[in-house]
Amino acid sequence: MNHTHRVLEEEHLDFLKEMMNIGIGNAAAALEQILQSQVEVRIPTVTILSALEMPDYFADPTFPVACAKMGMVGDVAGDLLFIVPADERTALIHLAEEAMPGTELTKRELAKTTEWDTSVLSELANILAGVYLAAIHEFSGLNLYHTVPVLSLDMIQAITDEPIAQWVSQNPLIILIENNLILKQEQVNAYFLFLMSVLTKEILSDAIQSARQKMCGQEG
Amino acid sequence: MVSEHCGEDRDRHVEALVLPVKMGRALITAAPNVMVCAGLGSCVALAFYERHKKIGGLAHIMLPDSSIFRSRFSGHGLQDLSSKGGEAQSAKGSTTGTNTPVNLLPPSPHLWSVYQCADTAIAALLEGMLGNGVTPQELVAKIAGGARMFSSYENSAADRSIGEHNVLAVKRILTMKRIRLIGAHTGGTCGRNVQFHLDSGRLIVKRIGMEDEEI
């Protein structure tokens, strides 16, 4: 792993990745309920970065995305971003709208309104973030809560630079999870980006340690 | 240095390089090169230009003030500020076919980079420009960026966003250093791509779904 996070040991990083993998399992189950159809999940790619490594991470910083940003409060402070490539958000929205009854909007109206897009995406982000954070809590005992999502559609770099700027002085731990889902034969990539303040890195390490002890205890 | 070679490079009609300037970084180079800041949200692209020598500097600034780092990492980085302008480094892999020198100001080896914050970035970029034989009187500045990417109830219009703070800080420091700001494309809620053409000093601002604008 990179030098920037030498504070965390390799086993801690492995544990963080495991925690995120458990999160996606739960998120998929929640998606199945919302979309009322089977959701196939590939093992997510979990990347841990420092804020200074972020500018080099995006191969195309101008890549258009839809992003729901939520504040993260509790044992770890930070931001939580739910990011969907702009061309794939329509697939996700179409699937969600099929499953969400009660809308009077026709397809033609839907095509020109973005308000519906934003509310569906915000709702998806809300549910998935909640499920993800609950999974982290179960696994590590960390209490994490998120604020109401705010949405933006723009270039990936433009969308992520404000949260990074906000937290960069704390040398945050950035966990990027690339989820590859198959919904009704449509492949959808959805990303979670956790920005965790370094001030609480010790708390995080302690939580991971206690989770390990708990697991070892259960095995014994 | 850039100033010693740019004249003869222009005579040879060298191929222009397109050089990205990433977040928290800065670059100084000469015509005919083009510098690019891609995906500016709340960040501000600050361009310095000298039209006779056709030398320009571009910084991709993230934050208004380095004091937040200074209090947290006191003694790290700030003392190195004076050396930031001089160290030259070729843009990796892309220099083939051109003789225009690229004076890449390297990212700080510390936990933060001087180019992340308006105060330290302007000081370092100015020093780099002066080091290339530019006089302060002939230096002009243009800025772009500083958007508010997320609007919410808790972050209401009455509160200044990071982008607005960045723009205000850059403008204030430029005034303080008596550098003429001749163009600005700031604020709003859209991300920007900026192209800085050193043959003309034009700064082209591109936004998704909108006409390109020139400042």
Image: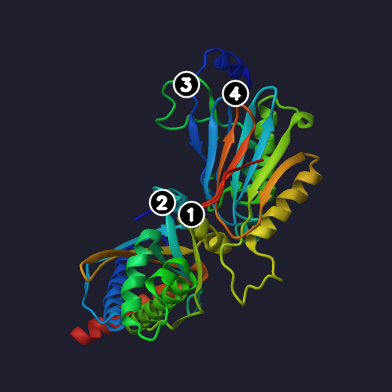
Residue kind at label 4, given as amino acid type? Val
The residue closer to the viewer here, B39 or B80, is: B39
- Give the chain letter at badge 2: A
Tell me if residue A74 comes above or below residue B127 in the rendering: below
Residue kind at label 3, given as amino acid type? Thr
Which residue is disc 4 drawn over?
A: B2
Which residue is disc 3 drawn over?
A: B98
- Residues tagged 1 and 2 counted as in contact (Cβ below 8 A): yes
Q: Spatial distance from mark 4 to mark 2, Cα to Cα?
A: 30 Å
For the residue labelled by badge 3, is the local secondary structure a helix, a strand or a loop?
loop
Residue B209 seen in the current view: yes
For the residue labelled by badge 4, is the local secondary structure a helix, a strand or a loop?
helix
Foreground: disc 4 or disc 2: 2
- Give the chain letter at badge 1: A
The residue closer to the viewer here, A104 or A143, is: A104
Q: Position of residue A97 (x, y in %)?
A: 35, 77
The circle on residue A157 is 1
Q: How many marks?
A: 4
- Give the chain letter at badge 4: B
The circle on residue B159 is none
Residue visible at 64% across and 25% down in the picture: B54
Q: Position of residue B140 (x, y in %)?
A: 73, 35
Q: Position of residue B155 (x, y in %)?
A: 63, 73
Residue visible at 69% across and 37% down in the picture: B126
Q: Spatial distance from mark 4 to mark 1, Cα to Cα?
A: 30 Å
Which corner quadrant of the image does residue B179 belong to?
A: top right
Residue visible at 66% across and 52% down in the picture: B186
The circle on residue A58 is 2
